[in-house]
Amino acid sequence: MGLYLDMHSVEAFLKVAELNSFTLAAESLCITQSGVTVKIQKLENILGYPLFHRTPRHIYLSPQGEVFLSRAQSLMVAHASALTTLNVCENIQNIKIGISDHVLDIPLMQTIQSIRQTYSDLMIEVKVDSSSKVLYALENKKLDIAIITQDGDKKGGEYLRSENYRWYCSPTLAFKQDKIPLITLRESCRMRKLILDLLLEARIPWFDSFQGGGMETIIAAAKSGLGIVPLPETALTVSDLKELTDASHVVSLPKIPSAHIVTYNNCLDVRSRTMLKDLSQAIKNQMLKMPDADEFVSLSRLMAV
């Protein structure tokens, strides 16, 4: 009887090769590290050669593994294509993606719209909320994928990019109080907690000039001159930047540390994992020009589920 390659073992090989780690591959595939090891060993026994070289601190592809890599990738593409053909006759699969409101920006909306067009056999639903609520929904199996700013209590996940933050305000902002007028999202927002800690450490008094709503709401509040708002640089359109300025030029404020944007997922099938891989790579490669405000409104409508 001939030998056959197990697709789960091939998938494990590709994930280890991608992440250079058995531990991270196991987390991504929602299996144990020993499970990944067994799958790789099974694959090596069938092929008759080692796929990886291991040292105490590093893992890397063997020469044979380098050759097998492209073949394995082609095999997974063919496998996913075969499943896609079958899915046409079945119900469209729903994939629920939760995104932190601090992470969702114009390029990400464009990327998701592009992914929707590529994976028309998947019904991709997008839910936007605070990172903590998105993570809670993922852990309770109400979401398939989470794209959030990494919280100190939750390790792991696949790194996508760094998010830089700045203080913004209207150029016309003027306040006579001895406390800075602060604009933030809801009380449960991770960024709000960080900002309050920074101000406390810097001994800068503040008061809640405006709190709550979504990103568009607090940006509008800052434009109206209601106070100073901490925002991701990518959250602002070209039009926004014409109405807002760097608030650190107005008052001395502490530097806001950058945050890591990561993705977590519950156990997905092969097709959904392929989609997530393409989505993650597109986010990492984002080099899109910021659209104007009219395009922002148009894209916001496209994102409605």
Image (cartoon, grey):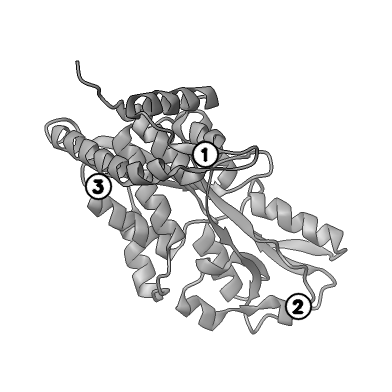
Whether label 2 touches label 3, CB < 8 Å: no
Res. 273 image quadrant: top left
Residue 127 lies, with reference to residue 228, above or below; the image says above
Whether label 2 touches label 1, CB < 8 Å: no
What residue does disc 1 label? Answer: 53
CA distance separating discs 2 and 1: 63 Å
The three-letter code of the residue at mark 3 reads: Tyr
Name the residue rendered at 40%, 41% in the picture: 65
Q: Is residue 125 visible?
A: no
Horizontal placement of 64 versus 219: left or right? left
Name the residue rendered at 31%, 56% in the picture: 113
Residue 179 lies, with reference to residue 276, above or below; the image says below
| Front in this rendered view, residue 187 or 9 | 9
Q: Position of residue 203 (x, y in %)?
A: 88, 63
Name the residue rendered at 25%, 24% in the picture: 4
What residue does disc 2 label? Answer: 175
The three-letter code of the residue at mark 2 reads: Phe
Of labels 2 and 3, earlier in sequence is 3
Report the mark closest to the observer, 2 or 1.
1
Secondary structure at numbered mark 2: loop
